[in-house]
Image (tube, rainbow, N blue to C red):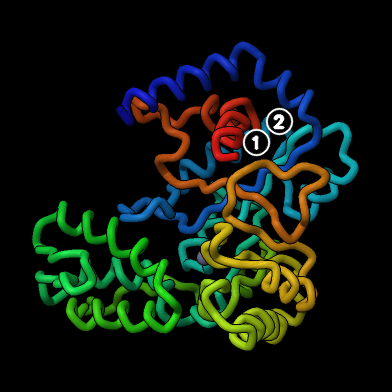
Amino acid sequence: MTKFNGWIRYLFALAFHYSGLDAVYRLLAGRGLVVLMLHRLRDEHDYYPLSTHCDTLARLIEWMRAQDALVALDQGLARLAEGKRHPVSYAITLDDGYRDNLRLLQPALAGTPATVYVATGHIGGEPIWAYRLSRAVETRSQDLLDLAEHGLGRFDLSVPSERVRALDLIPPWLKQLAHDDFELRLEEILRQLRPAEPEGAAPDMMDWSDVRTLDENGIEIGGHTCSHVLLSRVDDATARSEIEGCTRDIERELGRHPRHFAYPNGTAQDFGSRDVDLVKRAGYATAATSIEGINRPGTSPYLLLRHNVHEARYRAPHGELSRALFFSETSGLLGMLRARRVA
Ligand SMILES: [Zn+2]
């Protein structure tokens, strides 16, 4: 069924893109800003839809540049406000602060305008919980993971498909727990797995000198809280200290106030109007969600919509990266149809 849907979607993308229907739709729909949301830039296998190969990003960039559509976030917002000659612009953002984001400075990607949102408590420290979990599964010293008392059953992690199943089931279960419970259960899982980090393993997260290197090379650094907390799950004092503390950390390290913020996890369930107010009061000019869609002139700058990009996202069913899928899903008729279905 999924395969069938994949082909239908791809054939529609081809039809919309190459017939010119997408171009007509873009003209009629008017100005728009597509904000791409990436996380990691690496070629290694990822259990989560959060990694993009550098070659893949380089192709997307080439396509966007060919249309003079790729801009920095601030420039994209300016075009949205008044750029009549540019119906749709694209901006690139990356969340969390992974060390592989330094690849933005490699020759193939150098000069790419991008915003990197950092969870400052993780800079120079442990990865975000999802990667602590997948790393612990990979470097476990015990194969049996018993979560029967939480209704998730048992996993024999010596079997590859069991590792995939565990990492499919555990993150959504953790995410719906209250903050304190979440921490307790994560620690419980890590205790069971007893991960043994291989000696000399490269850190997942950037340190502050890496962040400064990005900053000095024109990459915009934005805020993403201190500990990547899901803001809707914490009390007022915690939400404030997470947002203000992260802002102060960036100011201290870079000598300037960050302009852009992204809500951790970023779905409509992960933050509320209190958090939007706190972000405004902390002096940010924009805040990005992970709710999918295209930003129009009336979109609140504190509720920017984004498109999640990962390695498999814009590939045709036969595996090739598809220009038609990319443009039709992000700013063409496929994206419009998807938005209608969600609404
Ligand atoms: Zn994040």
- The residue depicted at 45 percent of the width and 23 percent of the height is 10
- Image position of 184 (left or right of 110): left
Q: Name the quadrant containing residue 200.
A: bottom left
Vertical order, 42 against 221 (above or below) = above
Q: Residues within 10 Å of mark 2 (few under 14, many from 20)?
A: few
Q: Residue at x 19, y 59 (%)?
A: 163
> Is 257 left or right of 270, judged from the image as shown?
right
Amino acid type, callout 1: Met
**Disc 1 + disc 2, Cβ < 8 Å:** yes
Q: How many marks?
A: 2
Near-viewer residue (289 or 177): 177
Locate the C terminus and report the quarter of the image it occupies. Answer: top right
Q: x%, y% of residue 188?
A: 25, 82
Amino acid type of disc 2?
Answer: Gln
Instruction: Give the residue pinned by disc 1.
Output: 64
Find residue 171 and name its label.
Answer: none
On residue 67, the disc is 2
218 up-or-down from 258: above or below: above
Q: Residue at x 73, y 26 (%)?
A: 26
